Amino acid sequence: MNDFNKTIDEAYELFNQKEFDAALKLVTDAQISIAHNGEISDEVKTSLYNFKGFIFLGLNDLENTRRCFEKALEINPNSSQACAGLGEVFFIQRLDQEAKVMFEWALDNNPYNQFAVGGLVKVNTSLGLPEKHNTLNIETTIKKGNVYYRLLAEAYQLFAERKHEETLKKINEVEKLFCKSLTANSVTTRMASLDNFKGFNYLALGMLEEAQESFEQALNLNPNSSQACAGLGEVFYLIGRDEDAKSMFEWGVKNNPNNRVAQAGLEKVNKTLNLPVEDNSLLKRQSA
């Protein structure tokens, strides 16, 4: 165990020096070594996945970053660092509402998590809210007179734990609040966001017709929704409509160039179509 602790200390030192590749190798080697030498406690497993998540974040590898933090949450649903890490991923992808939910849950699990404190400040600023605005704060929730954000936060927590059927039930509870708790100006955008959220849960469950319907509803409400385009692209790709999938992934990238789902989808459908991975017909039209 002493060798393990020494290796992790060295990895942290490399991480602080921004030697991310070297730090990642040490952490991975440590995981393999300790797995061979005995049972790893859930606490250690969670800590290692969180550490790897932040290393991948330093490498700007958002896909592996998300996977590590999601794995940490599977082991410990109350991990403040995993919530904060996912919040950062969502913020980078310009999913501000989702980022806010995760930063708030991080602080609910550990009010002294400074990474989460800073994350909540910046996402609140992006949303035009007071820096310390926190919908999980009981006093704030009572003053607002609704439980929209609390239920939504619970839904994202379930989604992170891959409990997709339970997530869909929670989303239905959220939808019932629209008529009485949200102002008219905010309803359309938030309904579109919820439809996208439902769509990705249906995708995870292999319910492609329901997923398609959800993403199409989101696009009807918000024609510029990058997530809806990416979601539809994935549905079309799974049912073999490659040309349609390519078109939707391209629109997903156009509406949000940082949308990793759309980027990865475009790359894989281009490979299927024997095209360069970065081929984008929308960009060709703009340059023509």
Image: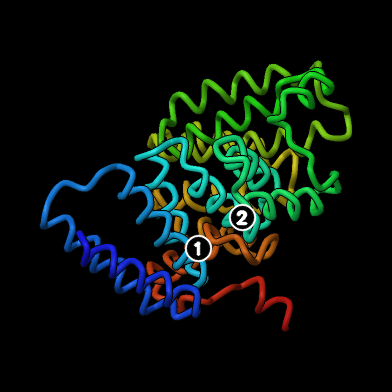
Mark closer to the observer (1, 2): 2
* 101 versus 236 height, above or below: above
Instruction: Pick the residue in front: 84 or 165.
Output: 84
Q: CA distance from mark 1 to mark 2?
A: 17 Å
Tell me the quarter of the image containing the C terminus: bottom right
Instruction: Pick the residue in front: 154 or 175.
Output: 154
Q: Which residue is mark 1?
A: 62
Counting from the top left corner in percent of width and height, residue 26 is at 30, 72
Instruction: Pick the residue in front: 181 or 195.
Output: 181
Q: Residue at x 52, y 20 (%)?
A: 169
> Residue 79 shows which numbered tag?
none
Residue type at numbered disc 2: Phe
Instruction: Pick the residue in front: 103 or 30.
Output: 30
* 201 versus 28 height, above or below: above
Query: Mark 1 falls on what kind of element?
Result: helix
Q: Residue at x 50, y 49 (%)?
A: 81
Q: Which residue is mark 2?
A: 115
Residue type at numbered disc 1: Leu
Q: Residues within 10 Å of mark 1 (few under 14, many from 20)?
A: many
Q: Is residue 123 left or right of residue 22?
A: right
Q: Residue at x 22, y 48 (%)?
A: 40
Quarter of the image for residue 29 reads bottom left
Q: Residues within 10 Å of mark 2 (few under 14, many from 20)?
A: some
Query: Mark 2 falls on what kind of element?
Result: helix
Q: Is residue 30 left or right of residue 12?
A: left
Q: Residue at x 43, y 47 (%)?
A: 70
Counting from the top left corner in percent of width and height, residue 277 is at 46, 75
Q: Residue furthest front?
A: 2
